[in-house]
Structure formats: C-alpha cells, structure tokens
C-alpha cells in the first residue's frame, strides 16, 4: 500500500517539511510539504535527492570488519560488539579513559539521540579526546558568547521577519539555506526585506548567489574584524551612540572606545579594500535604521581571529542599538523556566564551558568539552600519557573535512581500535577496524533540541520514523548504550548508567531520545507543563495533532538579554582580557610567493563531503573547480578550464579552474568536501568530477595547516579562509600541452 507520511528534512538547518511516499516500508519518493507553516512547499535538491541516499546500493547496511588485506567483510552485530567491547576494555586497562576518544561530525547535530548519547558517553568516560566538526565550523561562536555573555550557548540570530537593513558577512544563505539560524525559505525572507523598502548588503570576497540578489560589498578575506572595528570607530567618532544605554548594558565601554579609536576607516581600507566613505555610510545606516542587524557566518568563523570577529559582530549590533530589539539581532527563547540558573550551574562543569580543559598537544582550550579536531592526528601519533589509542568516528569524515587529511589518514592507521558509525564507507572509515551501519534520518523519529532557540519564527515539529531501519542499521544511541554496557565494569559511572538503562527498559520505560525530548517540549514554549497548561504540547501531541509542525510564537521576543547573560553583573563584557589579547593578531599575513587568498564556498548540490553519490545531484556532470578572477588568470597564463596547481605553505592540490568576474581579484574559491580518492565505498562519488588527472575532486584541506600554532587561539578554529596561496598552470610544471576542461560547476 502506498502512503504519504508527513515528516521533515534534517540535512541542514531550516529543517524543511517533507512528504515521504512509502510503499511496503520502502521510501519511494520525497516531496516538499505544502502544508508546512514555514517551508510551505519548499525543498532544495539535496532534500529531494535523499530518497537515493536512503536506498543507495553503496550504503553500509551490515556491520563491517576489516580483513587483514585491508578490505571489509560483513559480520553480525553480536560479533562486532563483542570484539569492540573487548578491545575497548583492553585499551582502557592499558591507557585509562584518556586513551579513548570520539569525533562526531555534522549530521550528529541533526539527531537528538546521537548528540545527547555521545555527550553522555564521553562525559562519563571523562576523556579529553572529544572532537567535532565544530572547530571547523562554529566553536568560535560559543567562545565569543562565553566572553560577552558568560553563556556559551547564547547565539543572537537576525530577526529576518522584521529587519529593514541586514548586513550579511561571510554567509551565502541562498546556497546554504542559512546557518546558526533556522529560517525556512530564507531566500524569500531576504527578498521580502527589499520588498518592504529595506536593504540587504552582502559583505563577501565573492559575488555570491546571495550577493547577486542584493547589494555586494566586496572585502579582502580575513579582514572583517577590521571593517567591524571601523564601523565602531565611526559610530563613536560621529557621536551616533546612545552611551548611557550602552553603559547600562555593558562593561568595558571605555576600553572599547580606546581600541576602536585606532581603527579609522581610512586606516583599515588598505587591508579590507572597503572604501572609507562606504564604511561611514554603513555605520550611519546601521544606527539610524529603525531595524537593522549584522549577521556573520562561516566566512567570519574560519579566519585567524574567528572568536574576536564574532564578538565584534555582536558588539556592532550592541553599540548600534540593534541587539535584543525587534528587527535586530535577537535571542531565541526556549521558554523553559530557570534556564539562566541551569546554564549558570553548568558553567562550573568543565565540559560545558570554555577552557574547562586544555589539549595535550598545543595546549589549546576546549570548547564545551571538545578539543580542536586539527590536533587529533598528533594526539594519536605523539607518545606519552594521554595518547589517543581508540577512536570512534560517528557521522563524520574528518579526513576530508579537517586540515591535513593525509596526516590524519596515516595517524588513524596507528590506532589500536577505530570504530565508525556511518551510513557510507568514506575516506575516514577506510581506516576503521569496524564500520557500524547507522540509520538515516527517515529511519528514526526526532525532535531536534539543538535548533530550538534558532528558529527566526519560533517553531516546533516532531516526527516518527517513516520507514524501519534498512538492513541491520541501528540508531547511534542504541549502539552507545551497548558501549556503556561494555565499559560498565571498567568505568564506575558507566556501571551506574548501565544499571539505570537495564532497570528502565525492564519496567518498560526505556530511557530514549523521545522521552528526553518530551520533557523539553512539555517545559518549553507552548508545552503542557506536565498538565499545568491544558492542551499544551507533548511529543505525542506534536506528532499526532501537528504533524506539519506548529508555530509557537509569530515572532522572536525582545528583551531576552537579562535572562541570557550569565555574568553576575548581568552585563555584556566587552573587555575580557582573552579577547583583548586577540587584537594583537590582526596583523597582515603576507608572503610575496603566495600572493593570492584562498576562500571556501558551498555548492547547491553538495552537503559537505557526503552527498556526491546521489545520481540526482550529479546530473549533467560536475566539475570540482577553483574559481578565479580573469585578471589573476591572465597574469599567470591561465585560461578557462585549465588544470592548475594550487599551493599554500602547507600543501598543494591539482584541479581545473574556471574564470569568473564574480570574485574579487586576488581571491580564489575552492569548494570543500571533494577529494574522493577511491578509498571510500561510494562508487559514484569516486568517479564524479573526472579529469585526466583523476576523479573525485581534490581535498582543499590539504592546503590548510593542522599545526597547533596556526589555529585560532581561543576556539582552536582551523584557519580555512584567507589562506595565502599561489596558482600555477599544471602543465607549466610538466611541460606538456595544456589540458582544457569544460567546467560544469554548479
Ligand atoms: N548546499 C549546501 N548547503 C549547506 C552546506 C553544504 O555543504 N552545501 N553545509 C551546511 C553547513 S555544515 C554549514 S556550517 C552552513 C554554512 O552556511 P554559510 O556560512 O552561509 O555557507 P558558505 O557558503 O560557506 O558561506 C560562507 C561565505 O563566506 C565567504 N567568505 C569566505 N571568507 C570570507 C571572509 O574572510 N570574509 C567574508 N566577509 N566572507 C568570506 C564565502 O565567499 C562564502 O560566500 O551551510 C550548510 N548548508
Ligand atoms: N575547507 C573547508 N573545510 C570545511 C568547511 C569549509 O567551509 N571549508 N566546513 C566545515 C564544516 S562547517 C563542517 S560542518 C564540516 C563537516 O565535516 P564532517 O561532519 O566531518 O563531514 P561530512 O562531510 O559532513 O560527513 C558526514 C558523514 O556522516 C555520514 N552520515 C550522514 N548521515 C548520518 C547519520 O544519520 N548517522 C551517521 N552515523 N552518519 C551519517 C555521512 O555518510 C558522512 O560520512 O566540514 C568542515 N570543513
Ligand atoms: S534546504 Fe534542502 S537540505 Fe536543507 S533542510 Fe531544506 S530540503 Fe533539507
Ligand atoms: Mo557546518
């Protein structure tokens, strides 16, 4: 029987509504849900193509064990878990908890069970070896908020529904669909700003898909902090600031004023290439517009001072009077009583705060209990106490997503035990002893806790699984429960949890993600408060009565700051010494041999490294290509479609180039997530983007440094943007005739 089931997509942050057509427990197709109150019938190509991923013949559907010749063979779950348990106990006996580690990748965030169970496991274990995609993504946001608000999880989001002047720095929401904000139909949301007479200004080195629909303000990569400082300079210098109000909200105003005095627009223009009068006009506009906000994302996260840049974004919003007000940068509210007390208490727990521990290699601060993934390889290869010997990788592909994949690949082979939980064989778990098959999102139910405070229109949706797990796939949290059992005699706290798990399942009250989410739903906005609010939401009510989800408030609520700030004085701290020390790092990074600057970009039909195996997303052929300005190309004798070598101080890659005026001269953009080299089991990904030098594209992170000295200091962020590079013709090196490609890069 064919049946339509209402659910939602969990690939990226808008969480668009989906209708899944299911027949005999098989997923037949996906289409956008017209009745979803926010996504209203929108879904992107990745969301639609997901049927091909669920049903992909290349998926891992049974536990796989490495064979002596380096291949994999199917084994039963019992065999796999028994051996993993035994080897884990052995590593624990010899090296203690700090011999065991975990890396969780981006899709883990899109599963409440995966996130919470991983956190529970690593916390009970007490290992310092917890890594995630965050140090290549968003950890600087947590650290900036730690300093400013004393609350690492506070994240202001732009009030898309009501803002009239939105400055987007280093984000491309028309392609990415928005990040650190859940805003379905974001493209329309931005166009609506223009339609109501407002402006959207896109500060970006590339004339992006978003910039093309709005005003483009080109900037030199990794100089956003300077632009923000100049905006602040003008605001103070031209007496635009309501200082009384500012001092009521923040401490360190005098220090800030003293610092920004040195950054006149005239003094920063040579670095940013943003003209002084443009900065002045923008500073005035941000203050005088009734509803204005500055929003920054990946482009402002991955520079050399990501934490400082992020703190300055908030500071500009604050000083311009645009923080925590209607139409500005606002804080989402979970509506749970006692939130502030809870976060305050958690700040005493080392793994829920900043720098609760520092890394053995590089002495870098942990962020919410995670260390920089860039140091993972050296943590494996450097002997001594605390050396990493057993590693779990769940929903991650760090060999492609983290700097210096070659170093990491080699290191993974030195582990005593490596276990992957994934839906595919990828370039990372090619090095695993076991690959355990995980369910995709449509094989599990979910209510996504991590995104609740990030919806630009407060919204809630929960779903049941639409099909049962394919093959022998299991949800990650159930596998983690087995790992807890395996270590129950080695780690006392695991023993306690194991007993609780056993008892709760015996009495038929299994402690699972749904039960946990249900608690949060009942406590939060619109929740039933355990019966106190009649007709209020519960998990079951959401699924049964609101399958398309429900808007719980028409708009974000202003005036959240007092409950958001955890600092005792309830003020924003603008002068925390660690942040101030970062100003010394705002120096130019020049090497005449590497005159160009590398930036990243996302493609509409890719999701990081893991959707290059879906035929729908490869249609028409795809080329993995560098984008370069024609002037830079001419200077180097490079023409459209040529194969080039891109070289940094840390490595080099070879790929075709495509020439475009849609990028600032001096800047080269290369998408990440490519570099499928045949080691992973995704056959189409491996053969995609073929040229005569190979297929699968190039791993741009070969150009990025994993040296702890090169990481951003406060959050351990990898420096993936603004990296000095040079580009040369590949054939110039070999003397062969140039090879030209018709680049199909969408
Ligand atoms: N289609 C698609 N969507 C995705 C993803 C995907 O892979 N594909 N990935 C998802 C993930 S994991 C995330 S985190 C989000 C990210 O969401 P976004 O941050 O919106 O995504 P990006 O496209 O990386 O946008 C970064 C922009 O910063 C610009 N940039 C680079 N360096 C600088 C700089 O120094 N200064 C300034 N001002 N700009 C700079 C780049 O040109 C680029 O346009 O996207 C999510 N959505
Ligand atoms: N140069 C450069 N590098 C970057 C970035 C950049 O902008 N530039 N962006 C960074 C960012 S923002 C991110 S988020 C990271 C991403 O980095 P990672 O998370 O390490 O890598 P992904 O490519 O997202 O790989 C995700 C893996 O999860 C698997 N998977 C998918 N769904 C599930 C599931 O439900 N369960 C399980 N167990 N596995 C699943 C996929 O098969 C895939 O192997 O890349 C970072 N790297
Ligand atoms: S934008 Fe695409 S991938 Fe992201 S949630 Fe929506 S449908 Fe899914
Ligand atoms: Mo990300």
Image: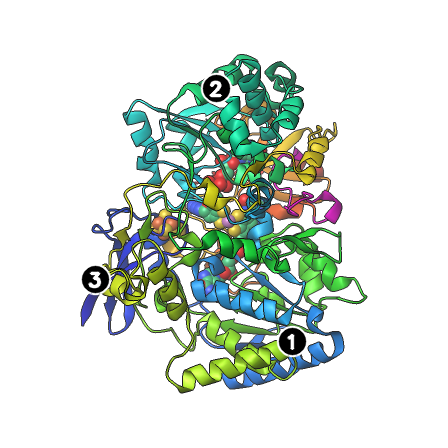
Q: Is residue 315 above or below residue 707?
A: above
Number of labels in the image equals: 3
- SS for callout 2: helix
Q: Nearer the viewer, residue 348 or 271?
A: 348
Residue receiving disc 1: 69
Disc 1 element: loop
Magenta residues: mostly which secondary structure? loop
Q: For mark 3, what is the residue?
A: 545
Q: Decide if residue 414 is on the left or right side of residue 439.
A: right
Q: Are marks 3 and 2 in contact (CB under 8 Å)?
A: no
Q: CA distance from mark 2 to mark 1?
A: 62 Å
In percent of width and height, residue 649 lies at 73, 40
> Which contiguous range is marked in magenta?
706-728
Identify the image quadrant of the C terminus: top left
- x, y percentage for residue 112? 43, 63
Residue on which the image places disc 2: 282
* Most foreground residue, 377 or 501: 501
Instruction: Write down the quadrant of residue 164 in the picture.
Output: top left
Q: Is residue 690 visible?
A: no
Earlier residue among tags 1 and 3: 1
């Amino acid at each position: 029987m064919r049946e339509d089931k209402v659910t939602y997509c969990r690939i990226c942050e808008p969480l668009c509504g989906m209708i899944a057509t299911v027949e005999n427990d098989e997923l037949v197709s996906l289409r956008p849900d017209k009745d979803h109150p926010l996504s209203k019938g929108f879904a992107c190509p990745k969301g639609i193509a997901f049927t091909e991923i669920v049903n992909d013949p290349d998926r891992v559907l049974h536990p796989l064990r490495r064979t002596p010749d380096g291949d994999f063979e199917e084994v039963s779950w019992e065999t796999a878990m028994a051996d993993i348990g035994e080897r884990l106990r052995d590593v624990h006996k010899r090296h203690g908890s700090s011999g065991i580690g975990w890396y969780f990748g981006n899709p883990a965030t899109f599963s409440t069970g995966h996130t919470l169970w991983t956190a529970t496991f690593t916390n009970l274990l007490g290992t310092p070896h917890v890594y995630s995609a965050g140090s290549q993504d968003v950890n600087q946001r947590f650290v900036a908020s730690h300093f400013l608000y004393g609350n690492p999880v506070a994240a202001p989001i732009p009030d898309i529904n009501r803002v009239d002047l939105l400055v987007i720095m280093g984000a491309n929401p028309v392609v990415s669909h928005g990040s650190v904000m859940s805003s379905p139909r974001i493209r329309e949301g931005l166009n609506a700003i223009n339609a109501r007479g407002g402006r959207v200004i896109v500060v970006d080195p590339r004339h992006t898909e978003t910039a093309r629909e709005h005003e483009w303000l080109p900037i030199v990569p990794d100089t956003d902090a300077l632009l923000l400082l100049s905006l602040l300079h003008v605001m103070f210098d031209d007496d635009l600031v309501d200082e009384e109000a500012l001092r009521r909200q923040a401490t360190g105003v005098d220090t800030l004023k003293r610092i920004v005095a040195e950054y006149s627009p005239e003094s920063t223009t040579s670095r940013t290439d943003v003209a002084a009068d443009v900065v002045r006009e923008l500073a005035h506009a941000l203050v005088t517009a009734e509803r204005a906000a500055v929003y920054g994302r990946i482009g402002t996260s991955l520079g050399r001072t990501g934490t400082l840049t992020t703190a300055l974004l908030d500071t500009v919003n604050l000083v311009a009077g645009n923080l925590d007000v209607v139409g500005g940068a606002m804080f989402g509210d979970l509506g749970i009583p006692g939130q502030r007390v809870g976060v305050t208490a958690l700040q005493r727990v080392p793994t829920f705060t900043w720098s609760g521990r520092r890394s053995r290699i590089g002495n870098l601060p942990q962020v919410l209990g995670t260390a920089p993934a860039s140091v993972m390889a050296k943590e494996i290869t450097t002997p001594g106490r605390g050396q990493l010997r057993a590693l779990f990788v769940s929903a991650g592909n760090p060999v492609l997503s983290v700097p210096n994949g070659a170093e990491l690949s080699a290191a993974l082979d030195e582990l005593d035990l490596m276990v992957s939980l994934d839906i595919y064989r990828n370039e990372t778990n090619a090095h695993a002893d076991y690959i355990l098959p995980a369910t995709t999102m449509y094989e599990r139910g979910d209510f996504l806790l991590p995104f609740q405070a990030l919806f630009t229109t407060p919204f809630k949706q929960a779903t049941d699984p639409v099909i049962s797990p394919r093959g022998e796939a299991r949800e990650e949290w159930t596998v983690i429960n087995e790992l807890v059992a395996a270590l129950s005699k080695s780690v006392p706290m695991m023993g306690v949890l194991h007993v609780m798990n056993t008892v709760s399942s015996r009495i038929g009250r299994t402690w699972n993600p749904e039960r946990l989410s249900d608690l949060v739903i009942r406590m939060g906005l619109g929740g039933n408060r355990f019966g106190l609010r009649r007709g209020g939401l519960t998990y079951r009510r959401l699924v049964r009565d609101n399958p398309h989800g429900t808007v719980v408030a028409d708009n974000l609520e202003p005036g959240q700051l007092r409950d958001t700030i955890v600092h005792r004085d309830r003020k924003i701290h603008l002068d925390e010494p660690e942040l101030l020390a970062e100003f010394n790092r705002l120096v130019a990074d020049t090497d005449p041999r590497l005159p160009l600057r590398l930036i990243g970009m996302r493609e509409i039909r890719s999701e990081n490294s893991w959707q290059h195996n879906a035929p729908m997303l490869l249609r028409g052929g795809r080329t993995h290509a560098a984008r370069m300005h024609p002037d830079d190309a001419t200077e180097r004798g490079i023409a459209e479609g040529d194969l080039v070598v891109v070289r940094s101080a840390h490595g080099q890659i070879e790929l075709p180039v495509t020439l475009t005026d849609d990028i600032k001269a001096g800047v080269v953009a290369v998408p990440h997530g490519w570099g499928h080299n045949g080691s992973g089991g995704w056959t189409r990904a491996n053969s995609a983007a073929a040229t005569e030098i190979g297929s699968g594209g190039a791993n741009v992170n070969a150009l990025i440094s994993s040296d702890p000295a090169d990481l951003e200091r406060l959050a351990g962020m990898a420096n993936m943007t603004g990296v000095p590079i040079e580009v040369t013709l590949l054939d110039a090196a070999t003397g062969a005739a140039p090879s030209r490609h018709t680049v199909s890069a969408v």
